[in-house]
Image (tube, rainbow, N blue to C red):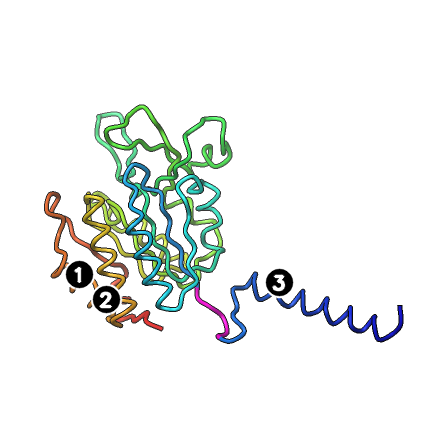
Amino acid sequence: MNRGKIIKVFLLLLLFIFSLYLWDNNIDPNNNIKDKAVIVDGLLEFSNSSFINTAAKILTDSGYEVSIIEPDKVTVDFYKNLPSRGYEIIILRVHCGPLRTEIGDGSYIPEGTVFFTTESYNAKDYQDLQNNGLLAVAKIRGNEEDQFFAIPPVFFENLENFHNSTIILDSCYGFWSGAPLVMAETLRQKGVRTFIGWDGEVQAHHTDAAVINLLKKIMLEGNTINESIEKTMNEIGKDPYYKTRLLYYPKASGDIKIIK
């Protein structure tokens, strides 16, 4: 092979490596680095493709590269790797529940909120995490036979930090009254700049409608977090059955505008 061909092959190799770098780091040569968003679709029996498609379109139209996590991918390992993915916007459409430890007299100690996985519980799996109290066991109301691994606040404490992310919890108990700020404060300490969720139970169709409205207010209209929450509550309202409402944390994030 002559010198000219060697140089040509070398340049083609460099171009290939550079293309892989752009792809791996989500960089558009014409638009610098694209911000990333993810929609986590793990609400199992409450599937809603219309919500997923509409939320994805709003985010895409707002300039985000959008990933959608299918139900069977919402595992313990998914949550373990979530902070390192660099998502600016995280929509968690997963089951949630109150975390509490029962004590001898029949009462309990509230410990915050858990995010469900869709991974069936097995006592032999993730034994190190289980033995260290970093996983919980959860059941969906009305389906007491099936158990799932669930993610308590303490799970995130030893993970990599989030990247100034906004988390929208499209589910119940983001701010469970028994211990309303445990999950939100844990996530704040791990690099989440805003956590949005409901202060109790909420019906799936109602939270889906509210989150779509909220995304429009934040992404398309350029409102602050506080303005977007207030306008969504005025337009969509509290859950008509449970009377719950959307909240955000910390309060200092209320003036943030995410519009690009």
Give residue 149's position: percent from left, percent from top: 40, 35
Give residue 40's position: percent from left, percent from top: 37, 49
Q: Looking at the picture, which amino acid does disc 1 mark?
A: Thr
Which segment is the magenta one? Answer: 31-35
How packed mark 3 is, by other alpha carbons closer than 10 Å (few <14, some 14-19, many 20 or more), is few
Rendered image: mark on residue 20: 3
Q: Nearer the viewer, mark 3 or mark 1?
A: 3
| 121 horizontally vs 222: left or right | right
Whether residue 9 is in magenta: the answer is no
From the viewer's side, name the closer residue of 224 and 212.
Answer: 212
Q: Are marks 1 and 2 in contact (CB under 8 Å)?
A: yes
Residue at image location 29% in from the left, 36% down from the top: 45
Read off the residue under disc 2. Answer: 217
Callout 3: SS = helix
Mark closer to the chain start, 1 or 2: 2
Mark closer to the chain start, 3 or 1: 3
Read off the residue under disc 1. Answer: 232
